[in-house]
Image (cartoon, rainbow, N blue to C red):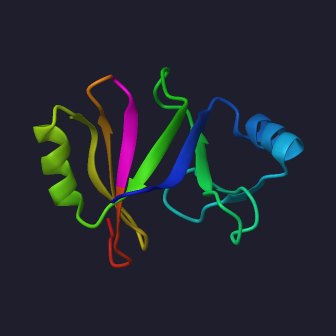
């Protein structure tokens, strides 16, 4: 069974958004040292139930919060998702040193991501 392993908040103003979530929930934001403007979000003590996430500048005017589901094989998941009626929104891409990521729309129009861990993933 696959589980949600990450969430992503898309925002217009990263400084304003990080201040809001820090003030309200005490979350911590750290700029990721990768090839794009991305902030990692720590939502609390890792010994407690919950997940951490990320934040990026909004690219899609409809984009708000996306959940990413951890999977074993991105290629197998792409096949299963499209066979079940889902559509690819962002094709398979490497997240260097982390893994492979792709985004889809489900049959109801909701966007979600799938992530296959693979430390050797590179551009």
Residue at horizontal 48%, vertical 44%?
A: 67
Residue 112, above or below 36: above
Residue 91 position, x and y percent, is 25, 45
Would residue 20 be found to the left or right of residue 7 on screen? right
Would residue 65 be found to the left or right of residue 118 on screen? right
Residue at horizontal 21%, vertical 34%?
A: 86
Residue 89 position, x and y percent, is 29, 35
Q: Which residues are magenta?
A: 109-114
Looking at the image, how many numbered discs can be counted on the residues? 0
Residue 36 position, x and y percent, is 51, 53
Residue 53, above or below 88: below
Residue positioned most to the front: 1
Residue 95 position, x and y percent, is 40, 62
Is residue 94 part of the magenta span, yes or no? Answer: no
Majority SS type along the magenta span: strand
Is residue 113 part of the magenta span, yes or no? Answer: yes
């Amino acid at each position: 069974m696959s589980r949600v392993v990450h969430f992503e908040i898309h925002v217009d103003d990263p400084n304003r958004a990080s201040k809001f979530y820090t003030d309200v929930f005490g979350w911590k934001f750290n700029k990721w040292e990768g090839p794009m403007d991305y902030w990692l979000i720590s939502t609390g003590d890792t010994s407690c139930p919950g997940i951490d996430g990320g934040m990026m500048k909004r690219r899609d005017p409809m984009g708000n919060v996306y959940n990413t589901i951890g999977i074993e094989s991105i290629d197998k998941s792409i096949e299963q998702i499209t066979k079940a009626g889902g559509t690819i929104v962002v094709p398979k891409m490497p997240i260097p040193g982390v893994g492979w990521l792709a985004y889809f729309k489900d049959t109801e129009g909701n966007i979600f991501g799938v992530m296959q861990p693979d430390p050797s993933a590179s551009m």
